[in-house]
Image (cartoon, rainbow, N blue to C red):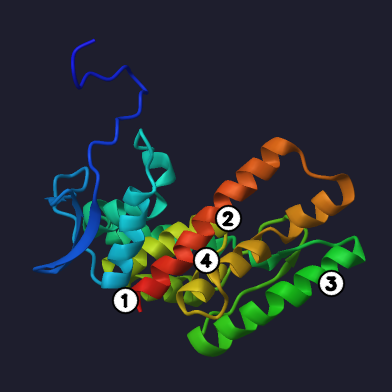
Amino acid sequence: MQRGFKEPGEKPRRFYKAVAAAPVDGGFAILLDARAVRTPGGTRLALPTAALADLVAEDWAAQGEFIDMGAMHAQRLANTAIDAIPASREATAQSVADFAASDLLCYRAEAPQGLVRRQAEGWDPVLARAEAEEGLIFTRAAGIIHVPQPDETLARVRALALELDDFRLAGLAFATALYGSAVLAVATLRAWRPAEAAFDLSRLDETWQEEQWGVDDEAAERVARLRLEARMLGRWFDGLG
């Protein structure tokens, strides 16, 4: 096999020893043996804060013999913020609003009463704060039949997203997809709830089912992977200040 050649699907070998975050014009770069990391689009990676740069640097430092980009959650989110968001801000904001149009927190179980109560206790305070602090008024529904949300609410969600810089907007969109809820994403962005606690709120129904029927290994592995993403997301927003 030729040097440097990789079979399809093969992970690249780690080619660096030292990882460091260093100030540069426009922010903080990630250096691999003094070589600056670039995004897939070819742009030099520049993070807006030292804390965020340290978070991304940890991804690179944690790699073993091979580089697993799939496990580098902060680096991938940084790539999105730099390469994708500037050209798709309107579409990204609309995707957040689309989640709000059928937000997880608005669809409640009709039974059993234990789950009904758990949803109310976990979700109602978040919805109340979204209404009080962001003017987001949502219609609740029992069951899974779709109910339309107020146009004013969806417009406000979209406007809220567009007010953010590229790095926060990337984080908000990531959170919305992770939770299946724009409301929980806003709660994480505004630090009403820690990111991992918001993840737990997004899984109330699943957790209830697991308590009744148990957890299989495949599901547990998936939840563990998503929880790592939630933890990264919390540090991402913390790192932005």
Find residue 93 and report its image quarter.
bottom left
Give the Cα separation between the discs numbered 4 and 3.
22 Å
Crowd tier of the residue under label 2, counting other residues whose Cα lies within 10 Å: few below 14, some 14–19, many 20 or above: some
Give the Cα separation between the discs numbered 3 and 2.
24 Å
For label 2, the residue is 227
Question: Which badge, 2 or 1, is on the more N-terminal residue?
Answer: 1
> Which residue is more in the foreground, 235 or 81?
235
In the image, residue 22 lies at what x, y percent?
A: 17, 64
Which of the labelled discs sits on residue 182, or is there none?
Answer: 4
Quadrant for the N terminus in the image: top left
The residue type indicated by label 1 comes to: Glu
Quadrant for the C terminus in the image: bottom left
Find residue 67 and report its image quarter.
top left
> Which residue is more in the foreground, 46 or 209?
46
The residue type indicated by label 4 comes to: Ala
Is residue 108 depicted above or below 31 in this figure?
below
Give the Cα separation between the discs numbered 4 and 2.
18 Å
- Residue located at (14% from left, 51% from top): 36
Which of the labelled discs sits on residue 163, or is there none?
Answer: 1
Q: Element under label 3?
A: helix
Crowd tier of the residue under label 4, counting other residues whose Cα lies within 10 Å: few below 14, some 14–19, many 20 or above: many
The residue type indicated by label 2 comes to: Arg
Question: Which badge, 4 or 2, is on the more N-terminal residue?
Answer: 4
The residue type indicated by label 3 comes to: Arg
- Residue located at (74% from left, 53% from top): 206
In the image, residue 112 lies at what x, y percent?
A: 90, 61
Closer to the camera: disc 2 or disc 1? 2
For label 3, the residue is 117
Question: Which badge, 3 or 1, is on the more N-terminal residue?
Answer: 3
Horizontal relation, residue 188 to residue 110: left or right: left
Horizontal relation, residue 226 to residue 36: left or right: right
